[in-house]
Structure formats: structure tokens, C-alpha cells
Amino acid sequence: MYPLREDFKRDRGFGGRVSTARMHPPDIKSRFHVRKRRVNREPNGYNGDMNLNDSACYQALATHDPRFDGRFFVGVSSTGIYCRPVCRAKLPAAKNCAFFPNAAAAERAGYRPCLRCRPELAPGRSRVDAESRLAARAASRIEDGVLESKSVTELAADLHTSDRHLRRVMLEAFGVSPVEMAQTGRLLLAKRLLTDTDLPVTEIAFAAGFGSVRRFNALFQERYRLNPTNLRENREGTRPMDVLRYELPYKPPLGWQELLAYVTGRAGHGAEARDGDVYRRTVRMNDKTGTISVGPAAGRDALVVELSPSLAGVMVPVLARVKRLFDLDADPVAITERLGDLAAGCPGLRVAGAFDPFELTVRAILGQQVSVKAATTLAGRFVMAFGTPVETPYVGLTHLHPTPERVTQETVDSIAALGIVRARAKSILALANAVATGTVSLTPGGDIAETTQKLKTLPGIGEWTAQYIAMRALGDPDAFPHTDLGLYKALGTTNPKDTLARAEAWRPWRAYAVMHLWRSLSGV
């Protein structure tokens, strides 16, 4: 009747603007008399086709989790208004909330749209908000730094639209053009580097993604009414640094040791390594290569990211990938409250993401029906055989992970020669061809349901693999690979229906429950 979207979109925190020029004058009531039809708004809204129950929806609403934006709407009986789950208005009482799968269902029940969060901008499947979905996808790509290497026209082509249409929908949704949004991100990064590092202004300009120092100085002066050097008036002896350093804050607690162990325990030899409390890996971004190191900041709720100078200019997308890899946008307190005793042993445990979605998807295929150790061994062989050799200052980091285009040059036989089962080799080759040709897009911020459906059309990728990819590479907080043998063991069952039933209590954060259940198993 009202099918609900089964995917999540990442709202990037850019609020829409309400133009007062378009609003009616204050004396509108004196000029017109509008008689409204009486409607009875009941707290319990239509929820027939929703995957989330009312309790799970309220949990997502309480945390304003942007990953649920567009998945449901909340009607508040005390005000007669319906909102998106990301709305920053005061949290209503649960008894006054009704949850709906789309805006049409909320309006049928008699609710009117919120002027603050603007439900019309929520990502969805209907024709009326198709433009908002386009704007959200574009914002996600811009945050990842796509305009550092591409033009707006090329970005529009990637999103299957025209640059003129893209500019229009971005302006309507966010009040700024794509270029202005990218410039704001660059300026904020530059301001942080000017304040927190000893990098010369020239290097900061290029590290933040500006093509010239002159352009950087002009834009900085225009936006902030300051010359970049003014921020350093009380500092002396600026000098070049051997690495670029940046801090990424997070909401505490963070189970760093557990997260680090999980990620590095599944790392491909040659491309990733662990050195004490620090995670290191090789990086290929556009035409630049280098290494990054990530570790905890002493005395602060943040991770310190160190990038080799060769990655200057792609700092924005690299940092965005680090945030996804270590799930730094999560709200662990709210998630722990929902999971209860399951999360008591490690309340700061996050869902390990992916620095490179293609790399993670290959790893997921290699992990089918084998142990973690065996899959990690195969992943290392894959990197060493098909990856690009690179010189680094760190022991164990010797190769860049192969790109989809590189893998397409191989055959099933050459991949199977590494000890990989032929069926898995066929799956990896099919995946590489699909990604290289654009048939499947693993770019963050895309349609998760559509992506997982396309993945399942490839040979060897079933529901377990698709859910694992959705959970780690695509950022779905409610993904749940319910046929996983580890989950069966942790829950003491072999019945997939029973597993799904048990997991209902953990929605909308079943992916976090998966991490805790796997952690409870020794050697997983």
C-alpha cells in the first residue's frame, strides 16, 4: 500500500533554507478564510509495511540518526505536524508519535509538514522527492572530495543528469551551488590546518584542494574577512612537516582496541598493517598514492590521522574514508541503550566500515564458507599478486590494493591459481567487471537497496554476502546477515527465522548487534 524504502541515505548535515520571500504576509487570515476538514490524528499511525517497529523508529528519532532519513516520518499528535527523523525540534513524547513509511501516508492521516526539517527534502522513492535524492547523493560525493578531480559537469554525468539540473536542485535543497559547497569544505579544512599544524600556507592551500595559492587567499579573504596568515600572528617558526596531521573527533566511548583488532585481523597482507595501537595502510586516491596512519589522540576523544605529504590535495576524501572505516559518526550511548546487556561488555564497539568498498567486497567474497584466518591469507595473496608495488617507510606495507580495472585483466584461472576456489574467482572477476563498467556502483551515499539487489545478480553473491557488504561497505546500520554461522553459534540456534526474530529487539541497529555477537566468539 505504502511501501517503505529499504535503504538508508546519509544526510550530510546541510539544512535546507526556508525563503521568507515566498511566505504569505502576516494578514493572510484577514484576507482569506480557509475552512479545514476535521481529521482525527491518532498516535498510532499506519505501520503495516514498515520494516521498523514503532520502538525502533522512536530510538532512531531520539538520536536524529541521519542514516534513517527518508526511511520513515513521524507525526506528532500534539502539534499535528510530521517531521523527518533528523529534525532538531524538541523530542516529543513517545505516546504522541505515529510513524509512517512516507510523507503521503502522514498527510493522509491529517498531519502537515514541518517547516523546520522540510519533509519534502527527505530522500525517498516517489517522483516528488526524486530531486532531493539527487541532491543528497551529490552532497555525499562532494563531501568525499569528488570535485577535487572532476568538474560539476562530470559529477552530473556520474549521477545521470545535466549540470544545469544538478545546480538547480542543489540550490533548492541546500541554498548553495555544488562549487560553493565544495569550497566551504576546503576552507574549513584549511582553517583547521592553519590553526593546528605548522604547514606553510602554500602547502595548506594545496592540501585543502585549492588549485592555486592566489585563489585560496582570495576566497579566504572573501569568506572570513581574514588573510590566512592572520590566524598565525602569534606563531613563529613555521616549518614543513614530514607528515600531514589531522584529528577526527568522535562521540565517546570508542572501543578502539576491539575495532582495531577486527579491522587488522581481516587485513590483506601488504596493503594494511597494525603497529601497536596504530592502524596503517597504503592509499591510492585519483592519481596520488601514499600511506596513512590512524591512532588514538592522547587525552582527547579523537583519532589522529597522519598522511604522507604525497596525499596533499586529496586530504578531504581520505579523511572521509577514515571516518567511515572506523564509524566515527555513530552515537554509541544511544546504540548501547538499545542493545542492552548485549553491548554491556564493550559499549563503544563500532561497526567496522570500509576504506575502499571494492576492496571490502572482494574480501567478503573470499570469506565465504572459510575461516577468518583462511580468508585473510587469500586476501594477502590477492594483494601481492595483483596489487601495485609501492615503497613506504613502514614494514609490511608494500602494495596498493588492485583496482577493479586491474582485476578485469585477469582470468578465472589466474585468480584460482592463488588457491581461491574457482567459484569465488568467478565471482571476483564478475564483480570487478561490474564495478569497472559502472553496472554496480559501490560509491558511498548511493541507493543501498538497489546496490545490494544488483550485487545479488552477480554469480556467487547471495543474501549473506550482500548483507555483509551493506553492513560494512555501504554503511547500513540495520543490516543483518541472519544466516551467518557465527551468529547461529552466538545465539545458540540454527534457525534463520529464529535469528531474525531475536534480532527484532535490536532494531534499528542490528549491524551493531552483529559486531557484539561476533566479538563474543573467541577467534572471530
Image (cartoon, rainbow, N blue to C red):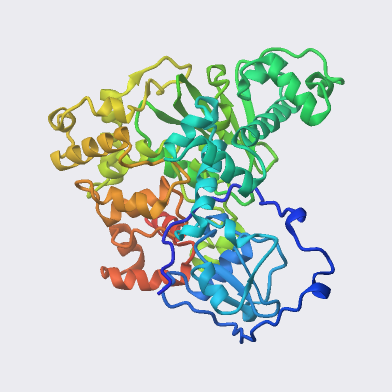
The image quarter in which residue 367 lies: top left
Residue in the image at 78% along x and 21% along y = 228
The answer to whether residue 322 of the structure is visible from this angle is no
Is 416 rendered above or below residue 129? above
Q: Position of residue 30 (x, y in %)?
A: 83, 74
- Kindly give the residue lying farthest to the front in the view shown: 31
Q: Is residue 101 left or right of residue 234?
A: left
Q: Position of residue 323 (x, y in %)?
A: 55, 41
Q: In the image shown, does 505 or 55 lie closer to the viewer?
A: 55
Q: Is residue 450 left or right of residue 247?
A: left
Q: How many marks?
A: 0
Is 227 rendered above or below residue 166? above
Q: In the image shown, does 351 or 200 lie closer to the viewer?
A: 200
Q: In the image shown, does 165 or 188 lie closer to the viewer?
A: 165
Q: Is residue 226 left or right of residue 129?
A: right
Q: Position of residue 261 (x, y in %)?
A: 45, 42
- Kindly give the residue lying farthest to the right in the view shown: 234
Q: Position of residue 118 (x, y in %)?
A: 64, 60
The quadrant the N terminus occupies is bottom left
Residue in the image at 63% along x and 77% along y = 94
Residue in the image at 71% along x and 15% along y = 214
The image quarter in which residue 402 lies: top left
Is 424 rendered above or below residue 200? below
Q: In the image shown, does 248 or 112 lie closer to the viewer?
A: 112
The answer to whether residue 94 of the structure is visible from this angle is yes
